[in-house]
């Protein structure tokens, strides 16, 4: 892949004059400007923009530099463009971590191992199968079970018929994994029964690395989580409805919960050290012109993170994320530029570049829980996540089956919450560039559950009507091949201009879009 050139970026430093049409300054959004930004955002130098990483921080500084140059109002913390988010991770302290069961001490490394979730517990035990709950699949091993104050005994892996694609929707309501369920239901801890493959490669004290970072949740109590050795597994499940052999061969382990013998009690302490790191959302505001309506906001969003780099293997190891979601990142940057260099609408405009979307919608969850403006003042959120790829004529690659064509885009969520917003979306499109809007993912039977898988969902949960623009999964999704040279910049500019025009229309409307449809799972 060619090296980064800074020459196109220099041309962006000066604001240009553009012909203004009925939707304001939409013509300012051009393929050339989008390409110049994306050649930096998706360059090898940013190393895949993982959350957290130096590459992501560099991308944030680039966004802030452009916003400052153009005169956008900072919308983050302390009159900056950055909304800081604290991440934490832990490392187990071997010599201070202990476990006792039935009067016997099980040493760390030979008797048990621990995840980075620390804490202490002394309690009775409850078997809960694999420990996963999925409303969509009708799987709930906690139904009718009282696990409060107990230690959960779980089988490793996921139950038959369940995949990570089914773990979509609202965490704690639509799905849970064992550690989340333990926190939700007030369990004291978790003991995992490993499968035979894990036990075959058991190494006593090799886990010296810290686990991954995750957002710090103030007031959240850590639930100690350990993995049992084969010896401990045998002792725990001796005389129970499920044998240790069944549990370690997890295809045979039932997911029906039951309490273990009342005489059984386990005491454990997982000691840990912690390390903190900071990341950030990038937030900017363009003030509106109407004395009353400028207190309301039309929000534009995209996630500027991606999935980083492969740590092993040969060949290209960088996941550049040009489409996912470099395309959205630079599109809302240019939408912001178009507003800043053209006429301003009546309502104010809020631009948020979210971090950590790839890790679980971290940035949008944090922003909607800790908004830098009144969350009730946001009248609409328009989210862009992948708008830069087009399916070529004659493409028979199964991996590109759902990829949209050059004049087509998936429009997700516009039919789900607000008839007003849907009407604006369709009217603007038909009177403007007349793209082909595909509503495939608004089908309640959508098995991919796309509506729940990008940052707009956290705004929708707050009752804010949304539209999500998406080109569809393709052969380079979450692969090193998602690079700038494969982007259709003409399509990308047309979608971005359509998003601009939709936002312009909502921002100038006399009334905010009414939410007349309750959000359904």
Image (spheres, rainbow, N blue to C red):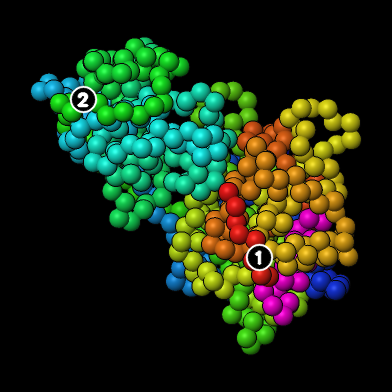
Q: Position of residue 192 (x, y in %)?
A: 33, 26
Dot 2: element: loop
Determine the image quadrant of residue 417. bottom right
The residue indicated by pointer 1 is 516
Q: Is residue 289 magenta?
A: no
In the image, the segment drawn in magenta is 494-512
Left/right placement of residue 247 relative to residue 348 reads left
Q: Is residue 292 above or below residue 118?
A: below
For label 2, the crowd category at 10 Å Cα-Cα, with few meaning under 14, some 14 to 19 and many 20 or more, is some
Q: Magenta residues: mostly which secondary structure? A: helix
Q: Position of residue 401 (x, y in %)?
A: 78, 33
Query: What is the total number of numbered labels drawn onto the structure image?
Result: 2
Q: Is residue 508 magenta?
A: yes
Relative to the observer, which residue lies in front, 119 or 10? 119
Quadrant of the snapshot with the N terminus: top right
Determine the image quadrant of residue 153. top left
Disc ID at residue 261: 2
Left/right placement of residue 319 relative to residue 153 reads right
Left/right placement of residue 365 relative to residue 291 reads left
What residue appears at the point 18 percent right and 28 percent down from the top-left corner? 262
Q: CA distance from mark 2 to mark 1?
A: 52 Å
What residue appears at the point 29 percent right and 38 percent down from the top-left corner? 147
Q: Position of residue 420 (x, y in %)?
A: 73, 67
What residue appears at the point 54 percent right and 46 percent down from the top-left corner? 169
Disc ID at residue 106: none
What residue appears at the point 74 percent right and 55 percent down from the top-left corner? 34
């Amino acid at each position: 892949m060619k090296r980064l050139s800074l020459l196109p970026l220099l041309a962006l430093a000066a604001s240009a004059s553009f012909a203004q049409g009925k939707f304001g300054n939409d013509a300012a959004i051009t393929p050339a400007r989008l390409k110049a930004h994306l050649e930096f955002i998706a360059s090898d130098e940013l190393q895949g923009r993982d959350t957290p990483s130096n590459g992501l921080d560099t991308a944030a500084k680039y966004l802030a530099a452009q916003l400052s140059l153009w005169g956008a109002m900072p919308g983050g913390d302390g009159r900056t463009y950055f909304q800081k988010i604290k991440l934490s991770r832990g490392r187990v302290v071997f010599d201070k971590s202990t476990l006792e069961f039935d009067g016997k001490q099980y040493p760390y490394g030979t008797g048990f191992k621990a995840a980075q979730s620390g804490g202490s517990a002394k309690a009775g035990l409850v078997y809960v199968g694999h420990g996963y709950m999925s409303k969509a699949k009708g799987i709930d091993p906690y139904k009718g079970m009282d696990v409060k104050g107990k230690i959960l005994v779980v089988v490793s892996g996921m139950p038959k018929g369940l995949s990570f694609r089914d773990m979509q929707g609202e965490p704690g309501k639509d799905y849970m994994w064992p550690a989340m369920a333990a926190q939700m239901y007030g369990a004291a801890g978790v003991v995992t029964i490993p499968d035979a493959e894990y036990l075959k490669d058991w190494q006593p004290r090799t886990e010296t690395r810290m686990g991954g970072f995750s957002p710090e949740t103030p007031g959240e109590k850590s639930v100690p989580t350990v993995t049992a050795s084969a010896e401990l597994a045998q002792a725990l499940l001796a005389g129970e409805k499920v044998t240790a052999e069944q549990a370690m061969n997890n295809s045979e382990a039932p997911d029906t919960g039951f309490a273990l013998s009342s005489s059984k009690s386990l005491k454990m302490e997982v000691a840990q050290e912690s390390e903190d790191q900071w990341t950030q959302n990038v937030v900017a505001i363009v003030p509106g012109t109407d004395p009353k309506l400028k207190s309301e906001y039309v929000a534009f969003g995209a996630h500027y993170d991606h999935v980083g780099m492969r740590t092993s293997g040969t060949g290209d190891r960088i996941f550049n994320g040009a489409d996912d979601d470099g395309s959205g990142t630079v599109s809302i940057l240019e939408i912001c530029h178009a507003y800043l260099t053209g006429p301003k609408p009546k309502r104010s405009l809020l631009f948020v570049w979210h971090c950590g979307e790839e890790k679980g919608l971290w940035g949008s969850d944090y922003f909607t829980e800790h908004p830098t403006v009144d969350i009730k003042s946001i009248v609409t959120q328009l989210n862009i996540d992948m708008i830069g790829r087009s399916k070529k004529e004659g493409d028979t690659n199964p991996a590109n089956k759902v990829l949209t064509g050059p004049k087509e885009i998936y429009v997700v969520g516009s039919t789900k919450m607000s008839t007003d917003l849907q009407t604006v979306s369709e009217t603007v499109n038909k009177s403007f560039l007349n793209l082909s809007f595909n509503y495939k993912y608004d089908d309640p039977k959508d098995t991919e559950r796309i509506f729940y898988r990008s940052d707009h969902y956290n705004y929708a949960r707050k009752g804010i009507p949304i539209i999500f623009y998406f080109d569809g999964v393709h052969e380079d999704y979450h692969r090193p091949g998602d690079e700038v040279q494969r982007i259709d910049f003409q399509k990308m500019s047309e979608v971005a201009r359509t998003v601009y025009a939709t936002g312009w229309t909502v921002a100038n409307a006399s009334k905010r879009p009414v939410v007349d449809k309750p959000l359904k799972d």
